Image (cartoon, grey):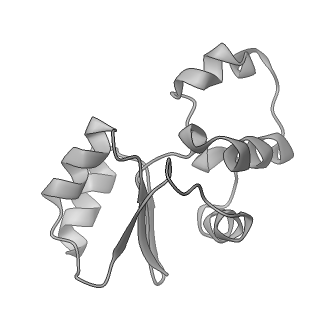
Amino acid sequence: MKKVFHLQNCSTCQRIIKEVNWPEDIEFQNIKDKNITAEELELFYTSAGSYESLFSKRAMKYRSMGLNEMQLSEADYKKYLLEEYTFLKRPFVIYDDFVTVGNTKKVVELLKEKW
């Protein structure tokens, strides 16, 4: 798989997409238009090691749904990731066996070095 999972109207995702010299064979998937599938999530889980590490606690719905006041299990994180696109940390990049999650400076530098 060679994809960048992003949110099209996220200014951080837009900035990162512009900054990186992506290979021509990479596909961009706007998760608002086409949410991730259960199969993709399982692949992400295998790469990341936990559903919690894929889960964005900065998403507005995290607080509005009261999830910040709950003890969430891995099963809960999985459920919410499949139900609501905003909970996926982004951008999520998978290019064969190369995987990055999120938008920290370290991740962005890693992407720039890769391409």
Label tally = 0
Q: Nearer the viewer, residue 114 or 33?
A: 33
For the C terminus, the quadrant is bottom left
- The x and y percentages for residue 69 are 75, 14
- Figure quadrant of residue 111: bottom left
Q: Is residue 83 above or below residue 100?
A: above
- The x and y percentages for residue 95 are 41, 78
Q: Is residue 91 above or below residue 84?
A: below
Q: Horizontal placement of 10 versus 51: left or right?
A: left
Q: Nearer the viewer, residue 19 or 82?
A: 82
Could you tell me which residue is drawn at 30 percent across and 85 percent down?
A: 25
Could you tell me which residue is drawn at 55 percent across and 38 percent down?
A: 86
- The x and y percentages for residue 55 are 61, 42
- The x and y percentages for residue 96 are 46, 84
> Please, which residue is most extreme toward the front here?
33
Q: Horizontal placement of 101 versus 27: left or right?
A: right
Q: Nearer the viewer, residue 36 or 33?
A: 33
Could you tell me which residue is drawn at 73 percent across and 22 percent down?
A: 67
- Figure quadrant of residue 41: bottom right
Q: Horizontal placement of 66 versus 26: left or right?
A: right
